[in-house]
Amino acid sequence: MNRVSGKCPVVFALDVIGDKWSLVILRDMLFRGKRTYGDFLKSHEKISTNILADRLEKLDAAGLIAKVPTRANSPRKAYELTAKGADMLPVILEMIAWSAKYDSYPDGTALIAGAPDDLLHRIKTDRDGLMADLRAALR
């Protein structure tokens, strides 16, 4: 049986996480421990409320995050990464490494703001250990 592919893998990924705000939300959850709507609104990038609500809904529908109650019988919700969302960690680390390599002044000094030097160093020298540490922190 000859199987016809539905989508290119790159197109599939872009359909799910192919906009700035979805990646910022995932970054904030993976690296900054953000979990609530209010936490995401405080991001340096200043996401608007309508865009934030839309992206949280899309990430939830795609299975990368899940709404959870902040405490029993509370109407307030928080968001947590699913296993599918946590699997975005290597992708985002690669984006950070790529940006650190190419977003620099002519003398090689990094322009990147926001990525701690120790993170950039560990991406270069101990990527596997860094991944293990970050995954353990997500549990």
Image (tube, helix red, strand yellow):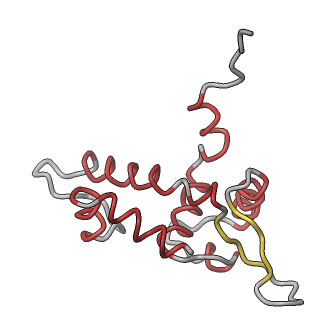
Q: Residue at x 66, y 44 (%)?
A: 16
Is 73 drawn above or below residue 94 in the view shown? below
The x, y position of residue 23, in whole percent, is: 55, 55
For the N terminus, give its image quadrant. top right
Outermost residue, left side: 107
The quadrant of the rendering that contains the C terminus is bottom right
Q: Residue at horizontal 77%, vertical 70%?
A: 67
Which image quadrant is residue 14 in? Answer: top right
Image x and y of residue 70, in percent: 76, 85
Res 7 → quadrant = top right
Check the image and name the residue furthest to the top. Answer: 2
Q: Position of residue 75 (x, y in %)?
A: 88, 84
The residue that appears at 68% across and 78% down in the rendered structure is: 36
In this rendered view, identify the residue nearer to me: 9 or 106: 9
Q: Residue at x 30, y 71 (%)?
A: 116
Q: Is residue 62 above or below residue 38?
A: above
Residue 138 placement, left or right of 54: left
Which is more toward the observer, 55 or 126?
126
Residue 113 is situated, as x and y percent measured from the top left of the image, at 33, 65
